[in-house]
Image (cartoon, rainbow, N blue to C red):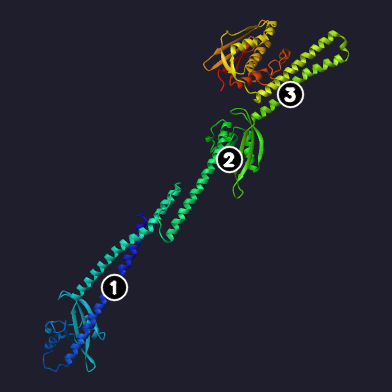
Amino acid sequence: MHRLWVRITLSFLILLSSVFLIAGFFLADILKNTYLELKEEHLHQTAAVILKAIEIDESNRDLQERIKDLSMPMDARITLIDLDGNVLADSEDDPKKMGNHANRPEVKQIMAENKKSGLSVRYSKTLGFRMMYTTIPIYEDGEISGVMRTSLVLKNIDSAINKLWISIIFVLVAAILLSTIIGTRIAKGISRPVEEMIVVTDKLKNSDYHARATSNPKGELGQLTQSINVLASSLKTQMEKIEENEQQLTGVLANMMSGVLLVNTEGRILLANRAIGHLLGEESENFTGKLHLEVGRSVELSTLIEECLKNGVEIREEVRLFFPKERILDAHLAPYVDDLGETKGIVAVLHDVSDIRRLEKMRSEFVANVSHELKTPVTSVKGFAETLLDGALEDEEILRSFLTIIYDESERLHRLINDILDLSSIEQLQIPLKVENINLTKAVYGTVETVIETAIKKKVKIKLPKKKDVWIQGEKDRIQQIILNLTSNAIAYTPENGQISIGITEGKTDVELQIADSGIGINQSDLPRIFERFYRVDKARSRVSGGTGLGLAIVKHLVDAHRGTIEVNSVEGEGTIFIISLPKKQA
């Protein structure tokens, strides 16, 4: 019952049925009244003719006989009534047996109401039918002397009227059925495109932007169908653009290294990208809908967000986070507004500058360390040279001693400059590896030969690995430099009568080189920094040993260049072991 064509059809049928019924009743009533009026006129004319015939007839026949004779060709009953209501003659009954008719409606209309004619239609109990009675006055010398009544049985008329009603009802039913068929087709023709448009709009509402109306009605419905199809096509295009822009925005936000927060005016997070979750130590999907105070975990950051929300101005400052680890963030906050200029919230972009600040600090320390390391030998060379120039040239012993010191310091200065240049080249990958097959055992033995004299002088024993061929791919000079730097450090920091052990363990895909000493060891707090440039565990002893503070940094970079790893374990006062793992084959 909720279908549109059903409602249209029902409305159409109700209206049409009402019109047909009203018109039918009206038409039947008009026909009935017209038929009765004709019969009434006929009875009046019959009465007038008979009355005229009685007046003309001069025979001495009885009035009753004359009435019967005159009524025979007439299809009507004729009755003569005097002023007292007595029946003088009747064409169908004995007047003496008939009662007084003074109170009959049609008689009273003439005698009491002085009308020119009378009419009454009523049911006759005697005959069992409805009868129509008409009366006209009988004048004598200008005065009413009686009433001429004509009557007619309405049995045939009632039958004709009933047939008329049956015909009208049949016509009405047929018209209604035909109208139902026609109305249904018309209603479906109107409702089908409308219902199709409703289905299309429902699909559009449910994000099915491929839906289209396929019907092609004429007139305004056709225009409406075309408009909806154009609207659907436009909506599809716009939604595709929106989805594309959303995907682009999502892709940009997801792959940004900087963290992004979108916060509304209530302080709740509307959007957070993956990088902000990494910075704050939590999945970014959990941020949406929460207050920034709940996820920020930084008083500085929350204060900046509140300030930006309150004042509506851009803010750029560095903030420090301590969870999940200590970081320094460059925070850029700015309000975002709608088309009316009303602030809807803020956008916070957080960039991790911890490494930059650490590198800046390392650079500053490097400059300071280089300056300090260069200053010491330069000062020594300058001081002893000035002393010689002031008169010590004549003393051969002093001259030789001072020149020896100047030579040693210049050598130290030379080693420092070379190490700085080597480290710089290695870090910038300006010296590519010359990959070749290297017998690591042979390289260890060859390298130790260059420092064995120093070890002997210091009474330090060096335990070498078994003479077994162990082959790896790499650059021979760089591998030997790794062994030399670590062995030299071990000799320098191992006291007299100490021991250094060098071992080689061969695996399936890599080779492990261990260099252990029984030296002074390294404090646990210093272990994370020993591969930094110029970092010294024992500054006094390092300088006495002639080290530059760059050896381990060079080792670390050379191991990385060979795609290897280096670990260090140490116990202060007991010794240190360096473990280097190198792949057998270089890619």
Callout 3 amino acid: Ala
Q: Nearer the viewer, mark 1 or mark 3?
A: 3
Position above or below: 235 against 33 = above
Q: CA distance from mark 3 to mark 2?
A: 44 Å
Position above or below: 201 against 173 = above
Judged from the image, the secondary structure of the residue bearing numbered disc 2 is: strand
The residue beneath circle 3 is 368
Q: Earlier in the sequence, mark 1 or mark 3?
A: 1
342 sits to left or right of 151: right
Q: CA distance from mark 1 to mark 3?
A: 122 Å
The residue beneath circle 1 is 27
Callout 1 amino acid: Leu
Residue 505 image point, x, y percent: 55, 12
**Label disc, if present, on residue 263 of the rendered structure:** 2
Judged from the image, the secondary structure of the residue bearing numbered disc 3 is: helix
Callout 2 amino acid: Val
146 sits to left or right of 373: left
What crowding class fits label 1: few (fewer than 14 Cα within 10 Å), some (14-19), or many (20 or more)?
some
What crowding class fits label 3: few (fewer than 14 Cα within 10 Å), some (14-19), or many (20 or more)?
few
- Comparing 414 with 114, the one in front is 414
- At horizontal 12% and vertical 93% (from top left) the residue drawn is 59
**Numbered-mark total:** 3
Residue 564 image point, x, y percent: 58, 20
Quarter of image, res 537: top right
- Comparing 50 with 487, the one in front is 487
